[in-house]
Amino acid sequence: MCFVKWTLVLFSTAEAFAFQGHPSIVGDGIGLDQIMIGLPGDIQAEDVFGKRLGFSVLPGTPSRKTAYSRLSFRSLQPTLSYCGNIKSRTDRRV
Amino acid sequence: MPDAIASGGGIAGINVNVSPVDAAADLMRRVGLKVYLPPSVTTRDASGKEQPGPWQFVLPEAQTEAEFPKGVPGGPGVGFLEYRNNASRRDPARYETLRARIEREVPDSRRAPGELHANTARQLLSVLVSVPNVADAVRQSERLGFAAGEERYVKDLGEKGREVKCGIGTFVFFEAANPRGALSAYIKQKGLGPFGFSVSVADLKTAQRVVEQGTNRKFATRKLASRSSFMVPAAFIGGTFVEFVQQVAPRGSSGTD
């Protein structure tokens, strides 16, 4: 039996955009950065996030154990160049 | 992750970008969390010299996670990472490369020229988390330095949520107080934890048109002084509530839908 799982990672932003707030665990980081979304398979990821919700789901570089797709966010304002991705991972287990 | 997939899909994890990671680890230890820093990958630079990987995680150990609810910073499903050696990600040319790749590899007649996404998405704003007790979740978050934010009623969920600021984004905690609300129904099926997220868009009308055509459903627009939005229920899109938001004023203000 083959078990397939797909992970979408939603990155919000940009490492260059450091948050300047009061001291916290975030420090000089940007804070909320990624959300990983589990879906049963590749088709569901493209159907849900591409066809239904209007994101651009990029096919990624497959490796022996994982395959990646990314959905990327980046501001069109150069001064707020946050950049992120939805990255999908497919692990196959027998 | 397997739980999220087995139940038809859903949020399996959240990552928070921190810097420096060692300071984050120290703070987590000071509040009583046992943490570990899993080895990152090792990469080689252009000259072939080995260097640390482009990120480093700090994660709470499993035995301490029960002290924090799922989806609350410090609890299961929330990781912390620092980016390192990632100058290439800051290269302005990366955006153009990305856009060109999307245009080449993901053709979409709905997408306007120059946009990365047909829905005009810009930024991840919030992650929505259901918890046993909002006040406790806020208190636990404050132990890690997250400041409590605004409270807002979300009509599509039938619940009032409380924001906790997390850098440029927010966690929004909800508890199922309304047994007839959409969130209560969702929790009965999937349990507590992260259940949705909010994304800012450049043009809400475009986003709504694309999503309504894609799902073949209509969604109510919610308007506040600071934002207009619509929420897509989890049942239509693989187990995750997705809110599209167009902000019309500086973030931080909110109110009632």
Image (tube, coloured by chain):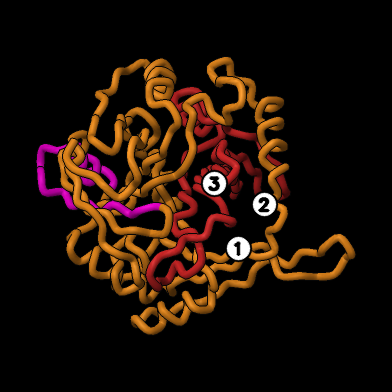
Q: Vertically, is A22 above or below B189? A: below
Residue B73 in which image quadrant = bottom left
Q: Are marks 3 and 2 on the same chain?
A: no
Disc 1 crowd rating (10 Å Cα; few below 14, some 14-19, many 20+) is some
The hue used for chain B is orange
Dot 2 corresponds to which residue?
Answer: B89
Tell me where residue A56 appears, x and y as whole percent: 57, 30
Dot 3 corresponds to which residue?
Answer: A80
Q: CA distance from mark 3 to mark 2?
A: 14 Å
**Which chain letter goes with mark 2?**
B
Q: Which portion, as a residue range, is magenta?
A: B169-190
Q: Are marks 2 and 1 in contact (CB under 8 Å)?
A: yes
User: Which dot, 3 or 2, sits closer to the camera?
Assistant: 3
Dot 1 corresponds to which residue?
Answer: B83
Residue B184 colored magenta? yes
Q: Are marks 3 and 2 in contact (CB under 8 Å)?
A: no
